[in-house]
Amino acid sequence: MSSYMANASKQSPKPTPRPTDAELDILTVLWSRGPVTVREVHETIAARKPTQYTTVLKTLQIMTEKGLVRRNDEQRAHVYESAQPREWTQQQLAGDLLQRAFNGSARSLMVGALSARKASKKELSELRELLDQYEREAL
C-alpha cells in the first residue's frame, strides 16, 4: 500500500457517505482551490454548467451534515473546505466500485478501466511502476 493511501485510511475513523455527482463537482472545486466561499464555488461550477447559487448553498449544507465538508463560520461569509483529501475520497470510491461492480476483482476493475478509455504510454508505464511498488510492499 502506498504511503499516502496508508495515511489516508487512518484519517477518518467513521465511514463517510459516498458523494453524489453534484457533491463530487463541489469537492473537485474545493480540492483544486482550497477553502472557499459558497459564491466562489458557485462561480467556478457555473462557468462550466448552469447552476443556481441556492442549489450550491443547499448542497454544501447537506455535505456539511454528511461530514463531506467542513464549514468555517468565523467570517461573515462561510468558508467551506473538503473534510478529506482527494486521494482518500478516490480510494473510497474505487473500493466501493470494486465491490459493487467488479465483485472485488482488482483485475476486472483494471481491465474495465483500460477498456473504457485508451491509456497513454505514460499512463501504462506509471501503472506498471505502481504494480511493481505494490508487489514489493506486499512481500
Image (cartoon, rainbow, N blue to C red):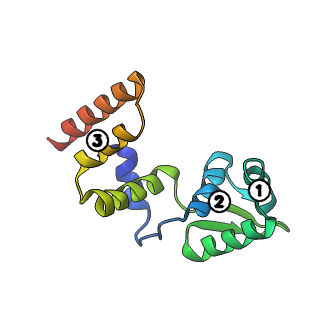
The amino acid type found where label 3 is placed reads: Val
Instruction: Kindly identify which residue carries mark 2.
Output: 81
Q: Kindly identify the residue that appears in the image at 52 percent across and 59 percent down.
A: 84
| Left or right: residue 87 compared with residue 57 | left
Separation of disc 1 and disc 2 at Cα?
22 Å
Question: If you read the primary sequence from the N terminus, does the residue marked by circle 3 or circle 2 appear first?
Answer: 2
Determine whether label 1 and label 2 are within 8 Å by CB.
Answer: no
> Mark 3 or mark 2: which is in front?
3
Quadrant (top left/top right/bottom left/bottom right) for the C terminus: top left
- Residue 76 percent across, percent down from the top left: 85, 68
- Residue 83 percent across, percent down from the top left: 56, 62
The amino acid type found where label 2 is placed reads: Glu
Q: From what the image shows, is residue 84 above or below residue 65?
A: above
> Mark 1 or mark 2: which is in front?
1
Q: Kindly identify the residue that appears in the image at 39 percent across and 52 percent down.
A: 7
Q: Residues within 10 Å of mark 1 (few under 14, many from 20)?
A: few
| Left or right: residue 12 compared with residue 38 | left
- Residue 58 percent across, percent down from the top left: 71, 73
Q: Kindly identify the residue that appears in the image at 79 percent across and 70 percent down.
A: 54
Q: Kindly identify the residue that appears in the image at 61 percent across and 51 percent down.
A: 28
Instruction: Kindly identify which residue carries mark 3.
Output: 111
